């Protein structure tokens, strides 16, 4: 099973893929409206906001968690070198 | 694949399985020499596969998170009810109850990196809950409570039981024993 290179989500169904295109390496949540992949900064801010919204964490802690997650993902690894 | 590579992989697998078992049983402060002894390898062999104890723990937590992600993603389909999601969450945690209890009770013994990896696992779980909570708030089947408080109330409930397992269920798996009561109570609290 493919996993999204930008957030790590397993992509099982066709609808999990960006634009329902199974040749894409990123998921529907990491795509912009035009189907292209979100930028590093867009994804970083999106992840931080989502952690705060879904778990109520402090912004500093949410930033650490989001960046730690991104550091391990193929799409963003190079941003942390 | 050469025999030597296969043997190396088998040794790594044995170390990982033994470490998971012993950490679950005795906690994260157990010595690597004991893991080596139980796995039937020399102490140095562990460090040939994992340069530090933190690397071994980080690998175990990441591997646990990966298993969880795949299971919850395949079990929690889009049309699922909250009840089905709660059942799915408890079912997955039941399979790893002892290890999970160590993660929540001994988190401070872990490296910062390993703690963040665990936080990442919880964020993934929160994502699935968030999707279902938002849908059910819109269709007015559950109360309009901020999604993070719904999630934290559920997590608080199951963590309280897990952290006090010796009082609630000293001899049996706790989540299996209290599954129905925890789910029905939580649903009773949040339903409109």
Image (spheres, rainbow, N blue to C red):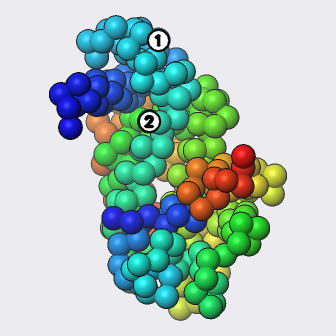
| Extreme residue toward the left, this view | B3
Q: Are marks 1 and 2 in contact (CB under 8 Å)?
A: no
Res. B151 image quadrant = bottom right
Q: Position of residue B178 (x, y in %)?
A: 36, 50
Camera-nearest residue between B85 and B64 = B64
Classify residue B33 as left or right of residue B57.
left
Please determine if labels 1 and 2 lie on a single subunit: yes
What label sits on residue B125 in the rendered view?
Answer: none
Residue B159 position (above or below residue B114)? below
Q: Residues within 10 Å of mark 2 (few under 14, many from 20)?
A: some
A64 relative to A13, above or below: above
Crowding around mark 1 (Cα neighbors within 10 Å: few <14, some 14 to 19, many 20+) is: few
Check the residue under mark 2 and report the chain it is in. Answer: B
| Quarter of the image where one finds residue A30 | bottom right
Question: Which image quarter holds the C terminus of chain B?
Answer: bottom right
The residue located at (56%, 57%) in the rendering is A74
Q: In the image, is B150 to the left or to the right of A53?
A: left
B49 vs A66: above or below: above
Q: Answer whether residue B43 is visible to the viewer in this image.
A: yes
Given residues B102 and B170, the one toward you in this image is B102
**Mark 1 sits on what residue?**
B31
Q: Assign a secondary structure to mark 1.
A: loop
Q: Name the residue located 34 percent from the left edge and 8 percent from the top edge.
A: B42
Residue at figure coordinates x 44%, y 64% from the top left: A3
Chain of the residue that carries numbered disc 1 in the rendered image: B
Residue bearing mark 2: B60
- Measure the alpha-carbon separation of dots 1 and 2: 16 Å
Say which residue appears at 67% left-offset and 34% top-offset. B112
Q: Nearer the viewer, residue B104 or A37?
A: A37
């Amino acid at each position: 099973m493919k996993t999204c290179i930008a957030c790590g989500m397993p992509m099982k169904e066709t609808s999990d893929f960006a634009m329902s295109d199974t040749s894409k390496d990123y998921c529907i949540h990491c795509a912009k409206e035009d189907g292209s992949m979100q930028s590093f900064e867009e994804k970083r801010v999106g992840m931080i906001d989502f952690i705060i919204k879904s778990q109520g964490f402090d912004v500093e802690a949410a930033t650490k968690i989001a960046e730690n997650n991104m550091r391990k993902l193929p799409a963003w690894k190079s941003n942390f070198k | 694949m050469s025999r030597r590579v296969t043997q190396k992989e088998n040794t790594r697998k044995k170390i990982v399985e033994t470490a998971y078992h012993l950490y679950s049983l005795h906690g994260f402060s157990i010595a690597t020499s004991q893991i080596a002894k139980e796995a039937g390898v020399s102490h140095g062999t562990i460090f040939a596969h994992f340069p530090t104890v933190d690397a071994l723990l980080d690998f175990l937590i990441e591997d646990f998170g990966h298993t969880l992600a795949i299971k919850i993603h395949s079990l929690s389909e889009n049309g699922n009810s909250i009840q089905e999601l709660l059942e799915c969450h408890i079912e997955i945690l039941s399979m790893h109850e002892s290890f999970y209890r160590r993660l929540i009770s001994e988190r401070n013994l872990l490296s910062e990196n390993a703690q963040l990896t665990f936080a990442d696992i919880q964020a993934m779980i929160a994502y699935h809950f968030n999707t279902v909570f938002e849908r059910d708030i819109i269709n007015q089947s559950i109360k309009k409570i901020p999604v993070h408080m719904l999630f934290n109330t559920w997590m608080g409930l199951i963590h309280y039981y897990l952290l006090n397992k010796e009082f609630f269920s000293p001899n049996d798996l706790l989540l299996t024993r209290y599954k129905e009561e925890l789910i029905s109570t939580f649903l009773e609290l949040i339903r409109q």
